[in-house]
Image (cartoon, rainbow, N blue to C red):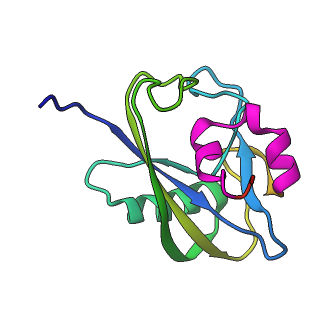
Amino acid sequence: MDYYLVLPFVVALIEGERGGVLIGQHPYLPTKSYPGYWDLPGGKLEPDETPEQCIWREIQEELCVEPIALALYGVYHHDRGHFLPEMRNMIPGLAIAYRVTINGAITPMEQMNVHYAFREELIRIGPLSTPWMRFFLKDMLK
């Protein structure tokens, strides 16, 4: 059996008090795999960090707010386009999604145009969303 390395990362599904899910737009930087694309808050695991520690850290770094509850939502694996043909990353990835409850007002630090989006908007921006965002929100888009 062949083994290979995967890039683990986490994403947060944060629902607003009035509904919707928190999304933001990646800046137009050459270092981003999906510059200008819409995405969920999250990021890559640091060495020796658990997924729970990572999502906690990423929420604090990206939104300047404290998570108060985490619940595992789902796991998604992409392997060089086999599962999602539009993947641009050459390194296989393993995304771990959490439903996250936050307390307080957010201050976006990394993504642009951060806001709570509802079903109609999520459908409209679908082609400009990261593949993992579309994967984790597919139930909301039915």
Q: Residue furthest left?
A: 1
Magenta span of residues: 119-139
Whether residue 122 is in magenta: the answer is yes
User: Height in image: 7 above or below 20?
Assistant: above
Residue 113 position in % (x across, y down):
81, 46
Instruction: Name the residue at 42% across, 24% down.
Output: 80
52 or 129: nearer the viewer: 129
Q: Is residue 110 visible?
A: yes
Residue 84 position in % (x across, y down):
53, 30
Residue 64 location, quadrant:
bottom right
Residue 93 position in % (x across, y down):
40, 37
Q: Is residue 41 visible?
A: no
Instruction: Name the residue at 85% across, 40% down.
Output: 124
Whether residue 133 is in magenta: the answer is yes
Q: Is residue 123 left or right of residue 82?
A: right
- Of the 4 image quadrants, the one containing the C terminus is bottom right
Q: Is residue 140 left or right of residue 97?
A: right
Q: Is residue 83 left or right of residue 18?
A: left
- Of the 4 image quadrants, the one containing the N terminus is top left
Instruction: Name the residue at 68% across, 50% down.
Output: 109
Residue 40 position in % (x across, y down):
64, 50
